[in-house]
Image: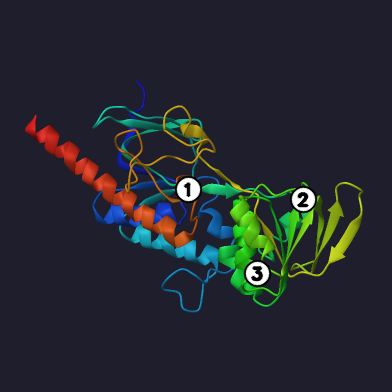
Amino acid sequence: MSAQIERVKTLIIGSGPAGYTAAIYAARADLKPVVYTGMEPGGQLTTTTEVDNFPGYPEGIDGPTMMIQLQQQAERFGTEVRIGMVTAVELSDEVGGIHIATIDDSKKIEAETVIISTGASAKYLNIPSEQRLRGGGVSACAVCDGFFYKGQDVAIVGAGDTAAEEASYLANICNKVTMLVRKDYMRASKAMQHRVNSLDNIEVRYNTEVDEVLGEQVVEGLRMVNNQNGTKEDIPITGLFIAIGHKPNTDIFKGQLEMDETGYLITHGKSTKTNKPGVFACGDSQDKEYRQAVTAAGTGCMAALDAERYLATVDTEAAVA
């Protein structure tokens, strides 16, 4: 006789600010949420040394501590947090249907509602010195970390709208911004290119790539290489920002949930509803515009409220029937 498959009211996939906020609201609504943390418990904030822009922390807080506190708050209301990875899903098309998730390629769990908060992963250059100094001056979010380099010299890698926007943001607070563009042109829109070129303290270096990030514990400089002639040059900087894009962690939902060409889940209107009834998406899995902890937390709240209302509707319809 096979073991009975566990069933939960609300399954939350992912454990960043969106997932834990969804858990707090879902638990308080008696939805008995179960959170599976994924491979990076706490999400991207666990790689951030200092969080200075989340409301309620006047002195700032380091990312890992903040995520532990969010987990503790969710658990205080009855959330069950489990270490594990959702590796496959079978999502129902029916209102009131049961969704099935596979955990770590083995265990199956049934869920009346699913909240997706799998986030997105920043793309990095993946050179050893860059990876070693992540959190020590190498960042993938200028809006998050640029404040710490006020009045200093920094560099940014990228050529699209995001890179141009972040370079402009950094130029307003930093002494000098060196922008490394791999090709001999920028992919950013003309408007964004004009903005970059209008700022005197941004120097755009075309056909230029990162050869090595200099420094032992923190970023002290950058060795650039011209990819046309191989010429190398060192410049002193204290911060390096990588702006070459993000990849949403949504591969397991392909073919079942609507997503854009880059993999961000599409939600309907101002809600967190996906194209499957009872399935909701929040945080960076569906937000490619803002990508901030506070906005992720806000959509986590929305997802829990949407799940609560969905279950109430299903229960009402069942009672009437």
**Label 1–label 2 contact, CB within 8 A:** no
Q: Nearer the viewer, residue 99 or 279?
A: 279
Query: Amino acid under label 3?
Result: Ala
Residue located beneath label 3 in the image: 171
Q: CA distance from mark 3 to mark 2?
A: 26 Å
Q: Is residue 209 left or right of residue 32?
A: right
Q: Quadrant of the C terminus?
A: top left
Q: Position of residue 174 (x, y in %)?
A: 67, 73
Q: Quadrant of residue 151?
A: bottom right
Q: Secondary structure at mark 1?
A: loop
Q: Secondary structure at mark 3?
A: helix
Query: Amino acid under label 1?
Result: Thr
Q: On residue 20, which mark appears? A: none
Upstream in sequence: badge 1 or badge 2: 1
Q: Is residue 85 visible?
A: yes
Q: Quadrant of the N terminus?
A: top left
Residue located beneath label 1 in the image: 37
Label 1 packing within 10 angstroms: few (<14), some (14-19), many (20+): many
The answer to whether residue 193 is above or below residue 307 is below
Label 1 or label 2, whichever lies nearer to me, is 2
**Label 3–label 1 contact, CB within 8 A:** no
Q: Is residue 162 visible?
A: no
Residue located beneath label 2 in the image: 127
Q: Position of residue 204 (x, y in %)?
A: 75, 59
Label 3 or label 2, whichever lies nearer to me, is 3
Q: Quadrant of residue 142?
A: bottom right
Q: Nearer the viewer, residue 280 or 181?
A: 181
